[in-house]
Image (cartoon, rainbow, N blue to C red):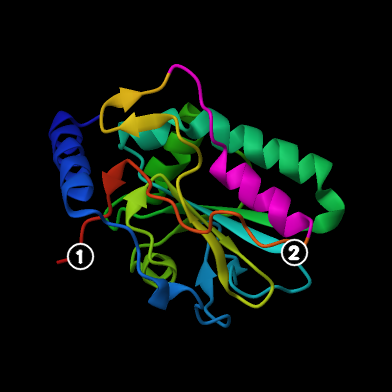
Amino acid sequence: MNRLRQMICAAAIAIAVVFGVAAQDRHSVPDVSLTIKDIRGRAQTPFKSDGQTASVLFFILQDCPISNRYAPEIARIVKQYGREYQPKNIRFYLVYVDPAVETTQIEAHLREFNLPDIPVIHDARRSLVAATGASVTPETAVVGKGGEILYRGRIDNLYEALGKPRRNVTEHDLRNALDAVLKNRKVPVARTQAIGCYITAQN
């Protein structure tokens, strides 16, 4: 891992916490027709239901240490909900937000961290970032049938604060959101503050 990039990422985390990068609700209803290709060249429409109950986008950065620490939990969530709720048709996406990362680097990262076999999007132009209001990696967005962002924020509360992971997770925010959506109930907490590497603005 590039040490300079690690230092930049650490600084970005501090900036994110200081300025409170919670996304604004104006991003809550993206354009459902937005189409973007995954790294295999297949067209993906994450905001269009196509009969799905929900879509889940994981925004990640290949060299963000906090994002990488969540790789096992991302895999567990995809495995559990993909298996247990297969008839419910929940779609999952991994969204890489570094404009400069190469496809070969993404593929290597997927293998290194045993990330799940789901559609992988390189959001080089930050189309999905802008549409959802994501601002940190790792951050997740749950999209409902009408394209509405039903939940956006942290995966869980593993991190109490910057550099302060808890011994045990006590709040499983993404899982709670998915359980509510699958029961056709309102998500109990629709927005939470993710802690991680700030998604820097493009030059």
Q: As drawn, is 2 to the left or to the right of 153?
A: left
Residue that appears at 21% across and 56% down: 200
Packing grade of label 2 (10 A; few <14, some 14-19, many >=20) is some
Q: State the quadrant of the C terminus.
A: bottom left
Q: As drawn, is 159 to the left or to the right of 50?
A: left
Tag 2: residue type? Thr
Q: Secondary structure at mark 1?
A: loop
Packing grade of label 1 (10 A; few <14, some 14-19, many >=20) is few
Residue 48 in the image: x percent, y percent?
64, 75
Front-most of residues 194 and 1: 194
Residue that appears at 47% across and 33% down: 70
Q: In the image, which residues are magenta?
A: 167-183
Is residue 115 visible in the rendered image? The answer is no
Q: Residue 150, located in which quarter of the rendered image?
A: bottom right
Residue 13 in the image: x percent, y percent?
22, 42
Residues under numbered marks 1 and 2 in contact, where contact means CB atoms less than 8 Å apart: no
Q: State the quadrant of the N terminus.
A: top left
Front-most of residues 10 and 21: 21
Q: Residue 144, located in which quarter of the rendered image?
A: bottom right
Q: Secondary structure at mark 2?
A: loop
Disc nearer the start of the sequence (1/2): 2
Is residue 169 highlighted in magenta? yes
Q: Which residue is mark 2?
A: 53
Tag 1: residue type? Gln
Is residue 25 highlighted in magenta? no
Q: Which residue is mark 1?
A: 202
Report the Cα–Cα distance between label 1 and label 2.
Answer: 33 Å
Kindly give the residue lying farthest to the top in the view shown.
167
